[in-house]
Image (cartoon, rainbow, N blue to C red):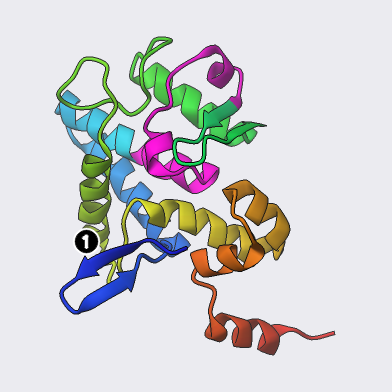
Amino acid sequence: MPRYYKVNYGRKTVRPFKLEDAKNIMIMLQKKRDATDNDRLKKIYDRDWLMFKLGLNTAFRIEDLLQIKVDDLLLKGTMYTREHKTKKEQNWELNQKLHKEVLDYINRNNLYEGEYLFKSNVSVNKPMTRQNARLRIKKYSDEIGVKYLVSCHSLRKCFARTFYEQTKDLITLQRMLNHATPQVTLIYICWDDDDQQKSRKEFYL
């Protein structure tokens, strides 16, 4: 079911990132990274850029994303996770371009096997916290003028909604997200009557 966060006027569903907004945030982070001479800030912007990139391309929950370490499987291009929430395992080969971006990030930041990809700013080898990830996602969203409600789950929802819009393969998406039913998946990606009407209007044989 949708994840809810309290707002001043009640409860509202966290929305998927619009793909254009997510891409604009990544462009902004790349520019911030390349413009600063501060090594600490450069690493932070680079880390946060990859967090967006992997979040959009793997559909991991943030708690699983932040636990990724440099290991032999990742270096060879395979993504593995045992989901914290469901305890289910997933294992698949990374897209070739995405794998190269991960390797480039590892090399840029001189990461060794056993280190977390998304390290905390205050510990030697601890992952950044979910709370910090949420604050940074909100911060960058505000900077580019996002008006809808977003949080960590917006990355996973963006993957899911974009996948469905491009493929209309609801069953595969349901299995990717480990949802119980297709109906749960449609609710999760915020697919509503307006989307249904738009799809029907655009359909022509």
Q: What residue sits 71% from the left and 53% below the top?
A: 172
Q: Quadrant of the C terminus?
A: bottom right
Q: Position of residue 46 (x, y in %)?
A: 31, 33
Q: Is 191 left, or right, of 66 in this rendering?
A: right
Q: Badge 1 local density, few (<14 within 10 Å), some, or many (20+)?
A: some
Residue closer to the observer: 42 or 197: 197
Location of residue 99 with respect to 144 vertically, above or below: above
Q: Position of residue 67 (x, y in %)?
A: 39, 28
Q: Position of residue 153 (x, y in %)?
A: 39, 53
Q: Position of residue 86 (x, y in %)?
A: 51, 41
Residue 184 showing in the rendered view: yes
- The kind of secondary structure element at disc 1 is helix
Residue 189 showing in the rendered view: no
Disc 1 residue type? Answer: Asp
Residue closer to the observer: 179 or 97: 179
Q: Assign the magenta stretch its main secondary structure.
A: helix
- Residue farthest along the right direction in this orientation: 205
Q: Is 107 left, or right, of 32 in this rendering?
A: right
Residue 66 shown in magenta: yes
Location of residue 37 with respect to 15 vertically, above or below: above
Q: For residue 195, which quarter of the picture?
A: bottom right
Q: Mark 1 highlights which residue?
A: 142
What residue span does the magenta drawing correspond to? 49-78
Location of residue 151 with respect to 106 vertically, above or below: below
